[in-house]
Amino acid sequence: MRGVALLGDAVQDTTEYVRPSEGGDVISTILRKEVTHDQTQGTCAEHYSVANANCTRDSDCIQGESDFDGHGQRTGRCIRYYNYTFKTCEIKSWCPIEEYAVVREPALEQAINFTVFIKNAIHFPKFKVLRGNIKPNKPKKLLRCHYHPETNPYCPVFSLGFIAAQAREKFSELCRTGGIIGVFINWKCDFDVDPSACIPTYSFRRLDMRKNLPSSGYYYRFAKYYHKDGVEYRSLIKAYGIRLDVIVHGHAGRFSLIPTIINTVTAMTSVGICSIICDWIMLTFIDKNEVFSEKKFDDVSKQPSQPITTDFTLTSYGSTHSDLSDGVPL
């Protein structure tokens, strides 16, 4: 979402009304921050990269006009761009603007060892089975274990480094640009055996497009507000991080005789096997199979043979020309 508006005399930008999505299936962590300190509402120069923001006189700036990529409404004045010699249009906004005063902090590289605990349960109402990915009688074990598909399948504790490696991503690159990774929990259960054998498997895949640079990565903005000398200030924070989207798939089955018979007969009927089997039974096991055979087939060997006569008519065509090489008439 993008846009700047005025609520009375207060400027409302995306930091005020946009928050990162939260919920039971989304987990976010901040890996790097870009901070703009001590912003206050007032007037300042627009950034020079905004369309039509560069100016030489006040008439170049239309009062009340707002640009889609801008930071606020123009006041109609043309002023110096902070400490530079060129000028841009003055705007009413949170000042100083982010592009001019931002401070880029180093990445939190130690977050590679941070762990994520993902608790999940699935219900198969048709089979009246409820399964979870942890064992309820061993909660203390979760404090010191990490997931392994063979040794620790009931320990859904994953490090961020493990998740990035499984998604085939470099953790250092995720710290720089952020990213969205899907955590896929797959339940594939066979209830012909004990339900305790139904254990989920986990897979990880990056969801945002890396090739499209403007929309790749994951970041959002938020602000911390405070008052000093009766004036409201804020620190604008642009946070880059990893967002984990938990996606659950479930599939279960159990053998049942009646559906098996129905499906088998349906499949055999669709390819015409049923009629062949019925004919074989009638011709082999029924007492009056000869009667059925006479009705089913025509015996051509008992029919009297009739002589077949064929009339041939030969028509010859001649030629009055001769072969000049041999003197033989054609």
Image (spheres, rainbow, N blue to C red):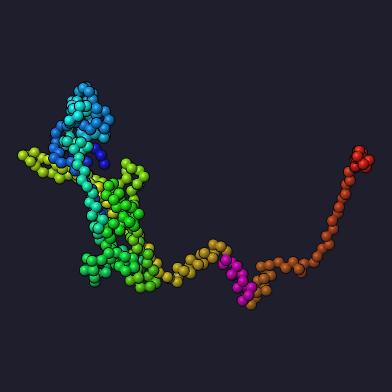
- Residue range of the region highlighted in magenta in the rendering: 273-285
The reply to whether residue 118 is in sight is no
Is the residue 65 above or below the residue 249 in the image?
Answer: above
Quarter holding the C terminus?
top right
Q: Nearer the viewer, residue 21 or 165?
A: 165
Q: Nearer the viewer, residue 143 or 283?
A: 143
Where's residue 83, x and y in %? 17, 30
Residue 252 horizontal side relative to residue 314, left or right: left
Q: What residue is rendered at 39% in x and 68% in y?
A: 190
> Residue at horizontal 37%, vertical 64%?
188
The image position of residue 185, as x and y in percent, is: 33, 60
Image quadrant holding the N terminus, namely top left
Q: Going by the picture, which residue comes out furthest to the right? A: 327
Residue 201: tell me if it is visible.
Answer: yes
Say whether residue 283 is magenta: yes
* Residue at x 15% of width, y 39% of height: 39
Image label count: 0
Q: Quadrant of residue 70?
A: top left
Q: Main secondary structure of the magenta part?
A: helix
Relative vertical location of residue 219 with respect to residue 260 in this rendering, above or below? above
3 is within the stretch colored magenta: no
- Among the 4 quarters of the image, the one containing residue 300: bottom right
